[in-house]
Image (cartoon, rainbow, N blue to C red):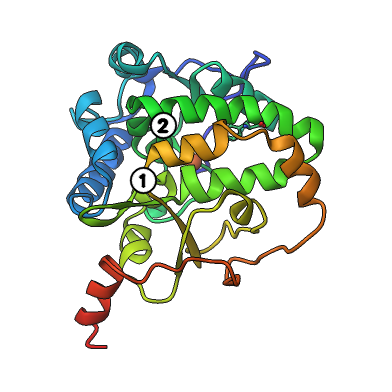
Amino acid sequence: MTARIQRISTRDDFVIEQDWSSYTPDEHAVWDLLYARQTALLPGRADAAMIDGLKALDLGRGGIPDFRIVNEELNKLTGWTVVAVPGLVPDDVFFDHLANRRFPAGQFIRTRDQLNYLEEPDIFHDVFGHVPLLTNPVFADYMQAYGQGGQRAMKFGRLKNLGALYWYTVEFGLIETPKGLRIYGAGISSSADESHFALEDLSPNRIRFDLERVMRTSYRIDDFQQTYFVIKSYDELFRATVDTDFAPLYDRLGSGPQYTPEDIASGDAVITTGTQAYARSRAGG
Ligand code: PHE
Ligand code: FE
């Protein structure tokens, strides 16, 4: 196994050329494999906004998407663009990109022995997982507002709390639809195993989204989630976050309860209907 060549940026926004022509046939094949596997799983599991976005951007035309082509369509739809970065970027750089409707996506793709898990977000996680929802106008605005909110959270020293909001919505959010619970978080939709687990496993809590509750909750980055927070709509998420001044909230968060991913709080609305009931009936319970 050879380590991937880490590209570096000479720019202070960490942006690099995607250099699409440098991907090898095998790297394109890894994208195709992951794409086929996830798109087979998503009907009936992923929210319509995700599936519509995948179609609108035509991310399955074959091989790793060329950002120049993706951006033509994405920019027309919501004014967002995808830019390539070497990997994780510093918080302030990340927030600045989002605040300017640029989504920084890892330029590299995982190797075949990392199909199910890797530590750093690669182009499959970032582009397949995150970018489709950026075609949804409300979600697109939420992401921009989050970037602006990040710059503010840094001043308050509350990045951990704001990070929990990102984690439990953008990365691991579920949404309640008339047809049942659906995935919209990129950490779920880009993972075969967690696409099953988040909806069908009986062990995790599925709790109605509440802004302050979420921001008081720690999160684990190295295992499936033990709690998923469920929104009713992107509009609910937008209203709860964008229409709220976080300054008094940040003041409050310095004291009061903190929750682990396993905890259920007394005020939680725990959701046990929909897919979970279906899973239980299939498990014979
Ligand atoms: N309304 C938040 C604030 O006052 C900003 C924000 C918007 C944060 C959307 C997250 C998501 O800081
Ligand atoms: Fe992500």
In-image side of 157 versus 230 (left or right): right
Residue designated by label 2: 139
Front residue of 130 and 85 = 130
Residue under the image location 41 percent in, 41 percent down = 125
In-image side of 254 versus 104 (left or right): right
Compared with residue 256, is residue 96 higher up or lower down, i.e. above or below?
Answer: above
Q: Secondary structure at mark 2?
A: helix
Residue under the image location 58 percent in, 48 percent down = 211
For marks 1 and 2, the one nearer the N-term is: 2
Q: Quadrant of ligand 1?
A: top right
| Residue 82 in picture, x, y percent from top left | 43, 21
Circle 2: residue type? Phe
Q: Residue furthest bottom?
A: 285
Write down the quadrant of residue 45 in the picture.
bottom left
Q: Which mark is residue 198?
A: none
Badge 1 local density, few (<14 within 10 Å), some, or many (20+)? Answer: many
In-image side of 80 versus 39 (left or right): right
The answer to whether the residue labelled 1 contacts the one labelled 2, judged by CB atoms less than 8 Å apart, is: yes
Front residue of 8 and 38 = 38
| Residue 263 in picture, x, y percent from top left | 60, 72
Residue under the image location 71 percent in, 63 percent down = 258
Circle 1: residue type? Tyr
Write down the quadrant of residue 202 in the picture.
bottom left
Instruction: State the quadrant of the C terminus.
Output: bottom left
| Residue 38 in picture, x, y percent from top left | 25, 48
Residue under the image location 30 percent in, 41 percent down = 30
Q: Which mark is residue 184?
A: 1
Residue 7 visible: yes
